[in-house]
Image (cartoon, helix red, strand yellow):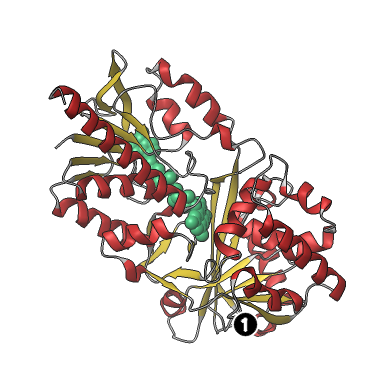
Amino acid sequence: MARIVVVGGGFAGMAAACRLSGDGHSVTLLEASLRLGGRAASFERRGDTLDYGQHILLRACGAAQGFLERIGASDAVSFQDSLAIPLLFDGERTVLRSWPLPGIAHLLPALLGYRPLSGRERFAAARAGFTLWAMRSSREESFADWLRRHRQTARIIRRFWDPIVVATLNAPSFAVSFRAARCVFHEAFFVPHGADMGLFTVPLGDVFQAARRYLEARDGTVEVNARVEEILASDGRARGVRLANGREIAADAIVAAVPPDALAELASGVPELARTVGDAHRLEWAPIVNVHLTFDRRVLGDAFAIGIDSPVQAIFDRADASSLAVGSAKGQTLVLSQSTAAEWIDQADEEIVGRLSGALRDLLPAVRDAKLVDSLVIRHRKATFVPAPGSEVLRPKSRTPIGGLYLAGDWTATSWPSTIESAVRSGIYAAAAVEVDAEKGADEASGR
Ligand SMILES: Cc1cc2nc3c(=O)[nH]c(=O)nc-3n(C[C@H](O)[C@H](O)[C@H](O)COP(=O)(O)OP(=O)(O)OC[C@H]3O[C@@H](n4cnc5c(N)ncnc54)[C@H](O)[C@@H]3O)c2cc1C
């Protein structure tokens, strides 16, 4: 049984810690902030528990579902039986549905009936979709360049490709690599049920409490408000960590599951990591702004919807929050999730709320008669990294040049974009590397 320290209590750190703990290792998880969850944490506001960021899973996110199952929280997410995305466009509502057809054909009827595009444009988009589906290799060009070479006009990109790309990659097609976009379509949208949407039924903080219980039931230790200041290493091997309060914890292995900026600080005394840290700094990050709007009545009949050709991107019904916020069961709180939000991030709250509720009136006629009774703007400057062309080589693998030191985090080399799925995968990869190396070490020590 090895003594393992995991630094960072987001999905990556928790996935690593739970896997290692489940396999019988002695795990200590150290989280700098007062709550677990990292970018997926929850907080209290007026007696209500809110997530800092509105999150969804797609059914293709198998590692994330495996993690929820491990910690006994499978019920925390509820998936659609079949992909159905309500689209709000020009004052109308239409639904992009999967059909019970094999392979990529499951989306064909939806695309051929896609109202935001003209008939010619639908055929052009379907043709490019088939070409993309048939592509087995990836290229380091932008997705927009690839789309343009395949006769996709600016309007087709804006009304069809970008709503999917922005929602899944938090960047438009001109900013993301063909490789990243291809991953989203091949892993999720081109597979029947791959893109079924999963909405969390509980605040994400509850998921992290379940993970904490899982660890503690296996004699693991979870400490919040425990900022690690330094990774201690000598002779090319990690020996432990020093916390901000000066306490040192010795370890056989350390999993650093923190974003690049935090890693740079932790590893400032480890010259062997300079190159990894330098590469990681070259990853670009993009903001997301979440806007909670509470109305005095119901204005959206769906659990979520996507705005097409509107400043409003994704809209979610926070059903559980509505009655609390307006003191009656009739109200409704919507969370507007604005991805690739450079345009919004530095605006004043009133301006954001004014512009978005104005745009919402055009999408949802019921908003015109409703009274806005509460609002909240939450900004995330570095929400997800941008999977730009050339960025894949900047993502480090879990093993480092330092023995006993492993990396995890959604930004490490999982080949997935910056998501819960990538974070969980990275944690599992790091945990597997710890175990393989520990076994190798034990074999060498016993002369086997
Ligand atoms: C607004 C928003 C919406 C999103 N929507 C989705 C979505 O719908 N679906 C999806 O799959 N993904 C979504 N994501 C992305 C998802 O949240 C992240 O990919 C995932 O949470 C990253 O997990 P992580 O563990 O890699 O990193 P983090 O969550 O950043 O965790 C790192 C942890 O390390 C801690 N830490 C840092 N330094 C130290 C230190 N020195 N000592 C100890 N602890 C330290 C931090 O406090 C933090 O808790 C969204 C993100 C945001 C911000």
Q: Is residue 78 above or below residue 133?
A: below
- Which is more toward the observer, 218 or 339? 218
> Which residue is most to the front?
448
User: Which amino acid lies under the numbered mark 1 shown in the image of this protein?
Assistant: Ala
> Which residue is most to the bottom?
330
Q: Secondary structure at mark 1?
A: loop
Residue 39 in sight in this render: no
Residue 67 position within the rendered picture, expressed as x and y whole percent measured from the top left: 33, 57
* Residue depicted at x 44% and y 86%: 329
| Quarter assignment of residue 72 | bottom left
Task: Give the left or right position of residue 369, taking residue 380 as reference.
Answer: right
- Total count of labels: 1
Label 1 near ligand 1 (CB < 8 Å): no
* Residue depicted at x 37% and y 51%: 37
* Residue depicted at x 65% and y 41%: 388
Residue 12 position within the rendered picture, expressed as x and y whole percent measured from the top left: 38, 46
- Which is more toward the observer, 64 or 447? 447
- Which is more toward the observer, 403 or 287? 403
Residue 341 position within the rendered picture, expressed as x and y whole percent measured from the top left: 64, 52
Q: Which residue is mark 1?
A: 370
Task: Give the left or right position of residue 261, taking residue 155 as reference.
Answer: left
User: The N terminus is located in which quarter?
Assistant: top left
User: The C terminus is located in which quarter?
Assistant: top left
Number of other residues with Cα within 10 Å of mark 1, as a class: few under 14, some 14 to 19, many 20 or more: some
Q: Is residue 93 above or below residue 383?
A: below
Q: Is residue 442 above or below residue 189?
A: above
